[in-house]
């Protein structure tokens, strides 16, 4: 069977609009363009400066921050902030350095975040893809009505379902578990179904027909033909889903009570509330913040192009 | 949004009819369960709970309109509503204006990916991270923001600890995180305007600002309409930044509706009353979406 070698060039669908060769940029130099560039430099600085500031503060000695608040470089450079985050300093040492004396269990929270984000991403994308295939390609009664019903879900603001979903998760006995955090969004989102259906509709039918004539079942066609041909939109969807699950705070805050199920966002909030109210441990706090932000920043470095190009009206999240 | 995209008519099939009903049911089963159990049922249940007294430990007791009567008479609720609307207003005006300018500049100056990547970076971190770093940058005594302000010979600003500054500050923090994303949405909309329009404009001797007024803005209207619907609805749900940076304070001056709902539900275990306020928020969002859709005519384009 030739289904594994189907040329991906036949695919059209709601992929990000193809970037054709950019039209030549106007090269005139004028005072207007100079102002425009100055504005862009300002925007970029404002976007990136806080990241530098986290790093600079995290590498400073907390007690020296008071005297050196105007220094652009780390004040009395030290790894103390990071050591307090990872629990490498003894309690007394940490308190002397201005910390809470209570380390955060960073690896545990990182593990929890990875588990929740992976569960949701894999489940949501896979189950949404199955449903999308049924809506795009299978022949069954009332297909369009069911699809419209699903799309209606786009109108329900997430925030409205949080409280009742919490009650449900509590009844299921899943409060303070990772599954409890992941479950409500693990099975589908209307957006994912819609996005993938649009893509599947655009896949040429002829390849599929050929496979069916060769005796392949529709299940096989889905797994061996449709999914492999759709790696690009599936990857885009998966990355965007992963980022938004990773950054979720409100829902995770409701469900988790102990370290058992705390994800990084929630743990960071807890770490912040533990720091001394007078004279907070800013070096430690910024080290924790930076460490919590790092995984997504690394992901962005790897997939920057895909992420940047996926944001448009076909890829709205 | 391509919600209006039509289904492709299945005309290529010969007379032989196929019926995949059983397979289809199997394929949609997980998604359908997720949809019914975690979206449809909670929506109905949320509305039901708003008519009950419910503390999570004992079963809900129906109490008619009590929660709604209490809500209408609750000054904290009205204050939260006012604070939220004020926040949404500041957030949306700032964010849309800045995003529009960024998008147009990306379109007219350079379309390099690194530039879009730089502007999008804050979107990659959580609201919690954004709130933490600005809590530090804007600290009254030690923050670099106030250090610079003091160095310029101005008075230090209590960004997050005065009632006058707190909402604009929270709005600005959220603008920092989301403006790049909004700019990229608008930028994608700009790509749909044919370059020939600008060439024609240039031929007629139109200046850049003139082309912005006469070509970009009118042709971008449907996209801007959708962007506004999405950002306004998102912005009404503000919670994370407030929970981390101010916890609703000072006093109630940043107690946005969602934070009050959380407080009532998880601080006082009054899930019935919290649900009633959620229903109110839902109604506000539905009405706003509908009105915006009509006003901006987001469904029709002038680009024909």
Image (cartoon, coloured by chain):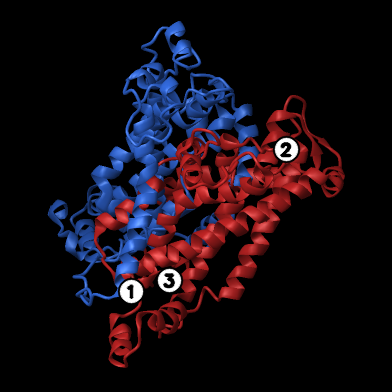
Chain colours: A blue, B red
The quadrant where residue B114 appears: bottom left
- The chain carrying label 3 is B
Q: Is residue B13 left or right of residue A266?
A: left
Q: Can you say which quadrant of the picture contains the C terminus of chain B?
A: bottom left
Tag 1 near tag 3, CB within 8 Å:
no
- The chain carrying label 1 is A
Tell me the distance, in whole angstroms, between the alpha carbons under discs 2 and 1. 46 Å
Q: Is residue B7 left or right of residue A173?
A: left
Q: Is residue B20 visible?
A: no
Residue beneath the point at 36% across and 62% down: A39
User: Do discs 1 and 3 share a chain?
Assistant: no
Dot 3: element: loop
Residue beneath the point at 70% across and 40% down: B260
Q: Find disc 2 in the rendering and name its residue.
A: B251
Q: Find disc 1 in the rendering and name its residue.
A: A32
Image coords of residue B117 (percent x, y)? 30, 53
Q: Find disc 3 in the rendering and name its residue.
A: B6
């Amino acid at each position: 069977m030739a289904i594994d070698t189907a040329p991906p060039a036949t695919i059209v669908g709601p992929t990000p609009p193809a970037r054709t060769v950019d039209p030549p940029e106007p090269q005139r130099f004028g005072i207007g363009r100079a102002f425009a560039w100055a504005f862009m430099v300002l925007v970029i600085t404002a976007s990136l400066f806080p990241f530098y500031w986290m790093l600079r503060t995290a590498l400073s000695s907390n007690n020296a921050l008071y005297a050196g608040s105007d220094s652009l470089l780390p004040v009395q450079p030290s790894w103390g902030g990071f050591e307090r985050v990872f629990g490498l300093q003894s309690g007394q040492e940490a308190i002397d350095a201005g910390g809470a004396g209570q380390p955060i269990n960073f690896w545990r929270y990182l593990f929890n975040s990875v588990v929740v984000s992976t569960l949701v991403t894999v489940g949501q994308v896979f189950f949404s893809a199955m449903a999308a295939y049924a809506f795009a390609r299978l022949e069954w009664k009332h297909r369009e009505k069911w699809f419209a019903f699903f799309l209606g879900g786009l109108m329900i603001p997430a925030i409205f379902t949080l409280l009742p979903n919490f009650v449900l998760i509590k009844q299921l006995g899943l409060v303070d578990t990772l599954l409890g955090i992941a479950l409500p969004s693990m099975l589908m989102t209307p957006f994912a179904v819609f996005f993938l259906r649009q893509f599947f509709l655009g896949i040429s039918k002829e390849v599929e027909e050929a496979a069916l004539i060769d005796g392949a079942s529709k299940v096989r066609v889905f797994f061996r033909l449709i999914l492999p041909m759709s790696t690009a939109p599936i990857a885009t969807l998966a990355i965007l889903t992963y980022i938004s699950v990773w950054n979720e705070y409100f829902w995770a805050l409701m469900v988790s009570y102990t370290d058992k199920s705390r994800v990084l966002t929630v743990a960071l909030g807890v770490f912040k509330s533990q720091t001394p109210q007078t004279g907070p441990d800013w070096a430690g706090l910024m080290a924790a913040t930076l460490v919590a932000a790092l995984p997504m920043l690394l992901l962005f470095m790897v997939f920057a192009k895909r992420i940047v190009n996926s944001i448009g009206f076909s890829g709205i999240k | 949004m391509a919600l209006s995209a039509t289904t492709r008519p299945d005309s290529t099939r010969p007379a032989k009819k196929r019926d995949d009903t059983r397979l289809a049911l199997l394929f949609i089963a997980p998604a359908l369960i997720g949809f019914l159990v975690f979206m449809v049922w909670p929506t109905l249940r949320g509305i039901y709970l708003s008519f009950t007294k419910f503390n999570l430990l004992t079963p809900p007791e129906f109490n008619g309109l009590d929660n709604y009567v209490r809500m209408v008479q609750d000054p904290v609720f009205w204050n939260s509503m006012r604070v939220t609307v004020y926040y949404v207003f500041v957030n949306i005006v700032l964010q849309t204006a800045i995003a529009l300018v960024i998008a147009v500049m990306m379109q007219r100056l350079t379309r390099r990916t690194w530039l879009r990547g730089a502007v999008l970076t804050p979107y990659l971190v959580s609201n919690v991270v954004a709130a933490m770093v600005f809590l530090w940058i804007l600290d009254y005594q030690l923050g670099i923001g106030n250090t610079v302000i003091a160095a310029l010979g101005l008075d230090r600003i209590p960004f997050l600890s005065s009632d006058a500054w707190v909402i604009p500050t929270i709005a600005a923090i959220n603008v920092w995180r989301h403006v790049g994303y909004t700019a990229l949405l608008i930028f994608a909309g700009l790509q749909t305007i044919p370059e020939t329009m600008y060439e024609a404009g240039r031929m007629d001797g139109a200046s850049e600002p003139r082309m912005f007024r006469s070509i970009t803005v009118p042709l971008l209207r449907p996209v801007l309409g959708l962007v506004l619907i999405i950002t306004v609805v998102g912005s009404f749900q503000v919670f994370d930044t407030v929970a981390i940076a101010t916890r609703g304070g000072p006093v109630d001056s940043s107690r946005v509706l969602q934070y009050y709902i959380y407080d009532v539900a998880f601080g006082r275990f009054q899930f019935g009353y919290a649900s009633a306020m959620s229903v109110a928020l839902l109604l506000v969002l539905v009405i706003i979406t509908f009105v915006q859709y009509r006003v901006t005519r987001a469904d029709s384009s002038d680009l024909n």
